[in-house]
Image (cartoon, rainbow, N blue to C red):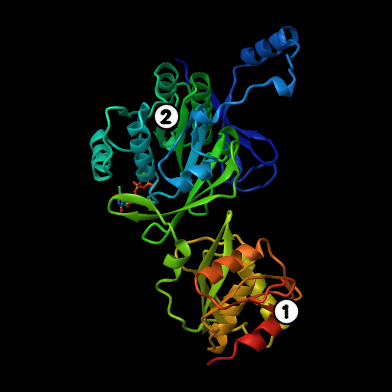
Amino acid sequence: MAKQKTRYVCQNCGASHAKWAGRCENCGEWNTLMEQVVPAESEIKGALARGAVSGKKLNAVSIDTIETADTESRLSTSFLDFDSVLGGGILLGSVNLLAGQPGIGKSTILMQVCAAVSNSGHKVLYVSGEESASQVKMRAVRLGASSGQLHFASSTSGNDIAKTIEESDYELVIIDSIQTLSLAEISSAPGTVSQVSSCGNLIIRAAKASNTAVIIVGHVTKDGTLAGPKILEHLVDVVLNFEGDRYGGFKTIRAVKNRFGSTTEMAIFEMADKGLSEVKNPSEALLSERQNTDGSIIMATIEGARPLLVEIQALVNPTNFGYPKRTASGFDLNRLNLLVAVLEKRTKLKLQDKDIFINVVGGLRLNDSAADLAVCMAIASAAAGRKLDDKIVVFGEIGLGGEIRSVIAPDRRIAEAKKLGFKNAIAPATIKDKFVLPVKDIRAALVKYMNNK
Ligand code: TYD
Ligand code: MG
């Protein structure tokens, strides 16, 4: 087959270049050139001509008469929370993308899902482009996955995989990973935009045609974006993010996009020698190793639909070289800089010559604005060497004026804190609850509650 021509199109201004460059010559933006397949000219003309004559009136029907897929056609992953993240299991005919950093456990969890689905009598195919059959077998043995219904193939050909999905009667197909696949028709290397999106398209079409559930593995880069194929996120039905610490700690799976369920659920996992297992009581586990030193604050957060108590730690040290260093693990760095600015302006803390480090314990990433108050109190606690009473949890958003603003689901946060034996919550004054020590602004919170040496 003839190789297709490609060109590099700037995603910012649309200019097309023959060669890749770091910067678009036309608009000056950096890193915006993406490889795209050039359709043959005759093909475009032919398609246009055909479009003019062959377009026909759409056959629209009343929405009441459309039949929905029944809920029976979902496959259970055997993990309760993972099922609810998916909206009740893996839907037949759906294409799911599982994205995560290398080594986080994508292949592991998918092998466990394969084992569970095949043991309940469904035909499953695991295609790996990264590992050999014996490597995958070793992992399967370790995870206790064995079933006559579970098949394995090693391939990096998008064409072959799509054909297999379409023509065999597998109900679930795992593809590990999209970055290793390529189509014979495209000359660019595996993992490039044109390869990933074309392979993705082909596989999606095959999955829909044969009503096969497909889970595609995608690697992400350090900054959390999908390596190469951001566009893939638009094509698939479900995008799952697998996050957390590679070495120990909790790992979470949440849906950032789900056409068949909500994106508020989250599953929390722990890696052991027999694979991943769900953490049943994460708050308890997260607090089990806590030492109440200065700079440590317990925050009641909401992850998806569930309340969770996490420890936020701060370290504040004098800066050795002129420019103060601020780092955050599990928390947005820009938000940290903003909060430090608010603390400097609205309280008497002097932080301009201090290095500040923030750590969210347990490998979690907080996206909750209610973390503001806890982060500020942790910084203040570390800076002043004072501790907060260890039976108090904290939550609340902080505005630029230093005021404490209300947050979502305060009652669920309070209920979780009560369950774990906490006595009070420092929280926005708008919440009417005896459990709450109401605070109006950050200064009042520090003056009133940050007093034990
Ligand atoms: P893996 O699933 O291969 O990661 P990914 O496919 O996301 O790149 O494995 C992740 C890590 O988990 C690996 O370093 C080995 C470890 N591991 C265990 O600790 N226990 C196990 O039972 C398995 C299978 C892996
Ligand atoms: Mg892997």
Please tell me whether residue 168 is drawn above or below residue 431 in the rendered image: above
Q: Secondary structure at mark 1?
A: loop
Name the image quarter holding residue 170. Answer: top left
Q: Quick one: 153 or 19, which is closer to the camera?
A: 153
Is residue 108 among what the camera can see?
A: yes
Please tell me whether residue 392 is drawn above or below residue 413 in the rendered image: below
| Residue 272 appears left or right of 424 | left
**Number of dots carrying numbers:** 2
Confirm if mark 1 falls within 8 A of ligand 1. Answer: no
Name the image quarter holding residue 340. Answer: bottom right
Residue extending farthest to the bottom is 453
Circle 1 residues within 10 Å: few <14, some 14–19, many ≥20: many
Q: Quick one: 39 or 174, which is closer to the camera?
A: 174
| Residue in the image at 36% along x and 26% along y | 123
| Residue 159 appears left or right of 48 | left
Name the image quarter holding residue 178. Answer: top left
Residue, disc 2: 172
In the image, which disc is placed on residue 441?
A: 1
- The kind of residue on which mark 2 rests is Leu
Are the two marked residues, 2 and 1, in contact with CB atoms closer than 8 angstroms?
no
C-alpha span from label 2 to label 1: 53 Å
- The kind of residue on which mark 1 rests is Asp
Please tell me whether residue 174 is drawn above or below residue 41 in the rendered image: below
| Residue in the image at 43% along x and 75% along y | 290
| Residue in the image at 63% along x and 12% along y | 42
The answer to which of marks 2 and 1 sits earlier in the sequence is 2
| Residue in the image at 57% along x and 26% along y | 69
